[in-house]
Amino acid sequence: MSCNVRQISLLACFLIVLLRVAIGWQFLYEGRWKLDTQKTSKPWSAEGYLVNARGPFRDKFRSLVEDPNGLDKLE
């Protein structure tokens, strides 16, 4: 009996498809949640992530925020 190392069993294929569907469901749920919070008094924002950006694109990410240094909060 020759055993092909690259051959995937039917159970493994099913589990891979199930994993991909679960990950897709998670992305769909999180995206819908972020869109739904836009109608609330405190909408979701990426401001905290963009303000704390580091690396070569730091200035580009910080330019996407209106007040990256938080100077408006001092008044």
Image: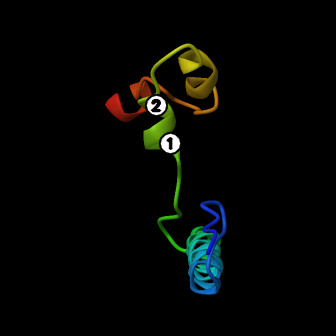
Q: Which residue is mark 2?
A: 51
Residue 49: where, in percent of width, then height?
Answer: 46, 40
Q: Which residue is mark 1?
A: 47
- In depth, the one of 73 and 38 nearer the eye is 38
Give the secondary structure at mark 1.
helix
Q: Is residue 73 left or right of residue 25?
A: left
Residue 63: where, in percent of width, then height?
Answer: 62, 24
Q: Is residue 35 left or right of residue 72?
A: right
Q: Is 51 drawn above or below residue 27 in the view shown? A: above
Residue 13: where, in percent of width, then height?
Answer: 65, 79
Q: Residue furthest front?
A: 1
Task: Quadrant for the N terminus, please.
Answer: bottom right
Q: Is 46 drawn above or below residue 4 in the view shown? A: above
- The residue sitting at 56% across, 13% down in the picture is 56
Which amino acid is tagged 2? Val
Looking at the image, do the residues carrying marks 2 and 1 touch, with CB atoms under 8 Å apart?
yes
Residue 2: where, in percent of width, then height?
Answer: 64, 69
Q: Is 3 drawn above or below residue 60 in the view shown? A: below
- The residue sitting at 37% across, 35% down in the picture is 73
Give the secondary structure at mark 2.
helix
Rounded to the nearest whole Å, what is the CA distance between mark 2 and mark 1? 6 Å
